[in-house]
Amino acid sequence: MSIGSENTRVSTQTRLAAMLAAVLLALCVGMLGGCGNNEAASSSAAQAPASSSTAAASESAETLNVTVSIDLTAADGKVETAEVSVPAGATVLEATQATSFELDVQDSQYGKYVNAINGVATGDHGDQSGWLVAVNGEDLMVSADAQEVADGDKVEWRYVTSFE
């Protein structure tokens, strides 16, 4: 084998390792309280053609019915559920804010981060405790303020004590 082909193989292995590390980091960050980065969706949404003013007006008048629940089974055993109506285009965070649940929301480099719900905060039950969010059973891979809800969606916030 020549030196040139070994350098190419090492370079390819290095690039693959870096790509794998980036994907794993993105997945881990997405699991921490529903936070993540949605640059691809943001850029494609920015490039979408503008809709007519009639469509925009009917969309803004439309309301969506969403179920929001908080599952504190891992902390104190409680599960609470609320039904809310939100305008079309509302996000998971906005639907959650429309409930009577008490939220502690903080800014992060990945979007809004839900640190606590009803007084139960990240880290209260161990170093790996915190909030995960799912919509219709699918964990979010973006922050809660980046994911829009649809009519009939079920938003579930789960407090976990470990990510294992």
Image (cartoon, grey):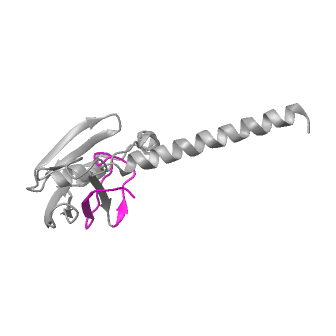
Viewer can see residue 95: yes
5 on left or right of 41: right
Residue appearing at x 75%, y 37% in the figure: 10
Q: Is 9 above or below relative to 119?
A: above
28 on left or right of 13: left
Q: Principal SS element in the magenta part?
A: loop
Could you tell me residue 30's position as x and y percent? 39, 48
Q: Is residue 80 magenta?
A: no
Closer to us: 37 or 62: 37
Closer to us: 58 or 32: 32
Picture quarter containing residue 77? Answer: bottom left
Residue appearing at x 22%, y 53% in the figure: 125
Q: Residue furthest front?
A: 126
Residue appearing at x 80%, y 33% in the figure: 7
Could you tell me residue 64's position as x and y percent? 21, 61
Q: Residue furthest left?
A: 100
In the rendered image, the quadrant that contains the N terminus is top right
Q: Which residues are magenta?
A: 137-164
Picture quarter containing residue 159? Answer: bottom left
105 on left or right of 133: left
164 on left or right of 122: right
Q: Is 21 above or below relative to 159?
A: above
Q: Is residue 163 magenta?
A: yes
Viewer can see residue 61: no
Could you tell me residue 55's position as x and y percent? 30, 52
Could you tell me residue 92's position as x and y percent? 26, 53
